[in-house]
Amino acid sequence: MNEKHKIGENFDKNQAEDIFEKLKNVEGKIKQKRKGKFDNITNLMDEAKLLENSNKYEEAIKLYNEVIFTLPDSKKAYEAIIKIYQKLDDKNNEKETLKKAINNCNKNEEFKKRLKELS
């Protein structure tokens, strides 16, 4: 046997895994993962949380707002923004965000309660 091509030693692991996955898909055993808008939202939320944890609040708010632009009733994104404004003791922006959350989210009782407390 040629020394350059020993079994199990001369292959690219990533390429082999890709080939194996394609073969499994051809046989119909698994479906290929599809990318959807919710994957992007999850990534934005994760990145925003990392920024928030690093005290980069303005950047985090921008990403949370991107989530809200894509998914206007995202209660989690509104809650995250409101918490940031609470940390910053920015009552005006907190009120504005609460108003938007009340208009866009179905389950908005907590938002209404908090807005009443601030008024």
Image (cartoon, rainbow, N blue to C red):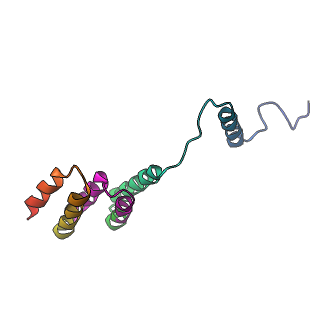
Residue in view at x 16 percent, y 67 percent:
91
Looking at the magenta stretch, what is its main secondary structure?
helix
Q: Indicate the position of residue 24 as horizontal and vertical percent values.
A: 66, 32
Residue located at (71% from left, 42% from top) = 15
Q: Residue at x 76, y 39 (%)?
A: 11
Q: Quadrant of residue 31?
A: top right
The quadrant where residue 64 appears: bottom left
Q: Position of residue 82 (x, y in %)?
A: 23, 59
Check if residue 80 falls in the magenta segment. Answer: yes
Left or right: where 54 falls relative to 43: left
Q: Is 37 placed left or right of 22 in the picture?
A: left
> Which x, y percent locates residue 77?
31, 56
Q: In which quarter of the image is the N terminus?
A: top right
Answer above or below: position of 70 versus 10.
below
How many callouts does the rendering have?
0
Given residues 117 and 14, the one toward you in this image is: 117
List the single residue furthest toward the right.
Answer: 1
Q: Nearer the viewer, residue 117 or 55?
A: 117
* Outermost residue toward the bottom in this view: 92
Where are the magenta residues, as a range? Answer: 62-88
Residue placed at 9% from the left, 59% from the top? 116
Q: Check the picture and name the quadrant holding the C terminus.
A: bottom left
Position of 65 with respect to 115 (left or right) is right
Is residue 35 shown above or below 19?
below
Name the side, left or right, on which 115 lies relative to 85.
left
